[in-house]
Image (cartoon, rainbow, N blue to C red):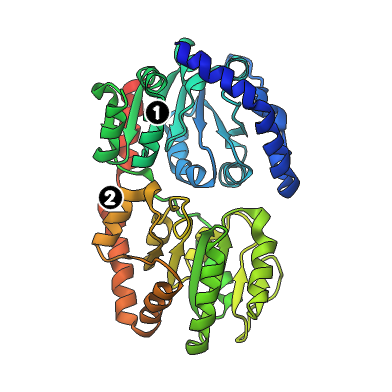
Amino acid sequence: MYMRYLYSLLFYLLLPAVLVRLIWRGLKAPDYLRLWTERFGYGPLLSGAEDVIWIHAVSAGESIAAVPLIRRLQARYPDKLFVVTNMTPTGAERIRTLLGDTVIQCYAPYDLPGMVKRFLRRVKPSLLLIIDTELWPNMIHYCSAMGVKTMLVNGRLSADSARGYARMARLTRSMLNEMTLIASQTRQQGDRFITLGLPEEKLSVTGSIKFDLAIPDNLPGRRDFLRMKLGSDRLIFIAASTHPGEDEIILHAFQRLRKKYRQLMLVIVPRHPERFDIVVRQATACGLKTVCHSEEINCDAETDVLVVDAMGELIYFYAVADFAFVGGSLVPVGGHNMMEAAAFNLPILMGPFLQNFDDIAMLFVEAEAMKIVKDSDSLVQTIERLCSDEDYRNNMGSAAAGVMAENRGTLDRVMNLIEDNYGR
């Protein structure tokens, strides 16, 4: 218990720095300061008459993954009220866009005792579902103390993260023991939770809910619109969820490729909105004719690059792409979700930094649906083959679709666990 007190004291001491960082990020992306009081526990004030299910999804990737689960929960528990919390504006935007007013969206409180307790008193949840791995000691402790069942869904724990949690072994063990259940993506990741102190009877291995991707109803019309915007005869290379350091590598590789493959076009989707203008300037500085998606103009034969400077558009661009690079992987971020690209039968390229999806990434590599590229040269070599060999491109895409088909069904398993532990 004293370790949690020590953790809380350290968090209080660091709070001024946390607030400075929030303001700094808000200067670049004003949405970070939107409804900032929610971060201090001033969530929605509910009457207490409602039966509330709380879902926490930290950012955009977790939010997108959570949407099919939330829709299943809404159908199963139509009398419940659903509150979804996020930590980032991109996550909040995805929830508001995809679920609208069918849920209450707000920011999660900072993990300090007073703020967490204030949030719980205002919202009064009976169940907390955490998506992926966003484990906060005070959040979990006070949920347990107030009788709120706490489940980690789509549990992911890389070897690096496990080593980090192991440095706080007593705090981690106490936190894991207070949880109701962890549904991990793979056996290997589940074993890491057990090594850290999770009782084995609280672990279930269900797979990743990201294999059960929900396709938007408006996809066909949106796909046709984008294909017209990009040009029906272009070969589309999409670089998705890119980070600083990756854009430069991709743009320089594309410069070399464009000289040989005039039909090739790059669609680049920066991970964070504050970087939209930066990437446009980088592409232009490379001598590439660049168009912004927000501009209401169609690309012509001379257009080299389209920068997607809008949130929530990635899935639609996957639908018109021919192959995809998935970012956060050429720089030490850990990689982003490759299953969205695979759902559209796309050959997948990623860098070597894959710790966020290590086990799942290997499924695609072993099926020859994904290639690991290490730098600009290997990126160019792989794309050259994809451009020149249609059979190779189609075989990789079919292999990606096969991996997706073999691993679907996680949502059913997760729903069964929730019903067994929360009620049918």
Residue under label 1, please give it: 167
Looking at the rendered structure, the kind of residue marked 2 is: Asn
Residue 407, which numbered label? Answer: 2
What percent of the width, then of the height, locates residue 49?
58, 14
Please name which of the two marks, 1 or 2, marks the residue nearer to the observer.
Answer: 1
Please say whether residue 147 is visible from this viewpoint.
no
Q: Residue 118: which quarter of the image?
A: top right
Residue sitting at 62 percent across and 54 percent down?
A: 311
Which is more toward the observer, 363 or 3? Answer: 3
Left or right of 88? Residue 161 is left
What percent of the width, then of the height, locates residue 407?
28, 50
Query: Eyeballing the image, is 351 above or below 395?
Result: above
Residue sitting at 48 percent across and 73 percent down?
A: 237
Look at the numbered disc 1 and give the secondary structure of its residue.
loop
Look at the numbered disc 2 and give the secondary structure of its residue.
helix
What percent of the width, then of the height, locates residue 167?
40, 28
Looking at the rendered structure, the kind of residue marked 1 is: Arg
Pointer 1: residues within 10 angstroms few (<14), some, or many (20+)?
A: few
Query: Eyeballing the image, is 77 above or below 113?
Result: below
- Give the mark, 1 or 2, whose residue is nearer the N terminus: 1
Which is more toward the observer, 94 or 26? Answer: 26
Residue sitting at 47 percent across and 70 percent down?
A: 321
Please say whether residue 294 is visible from this viewpoint.
yes
What percent of the width, then of the height, locates residue 210?
39, 47
Q: Residue 345: which quarter of the image?
A: bottom left
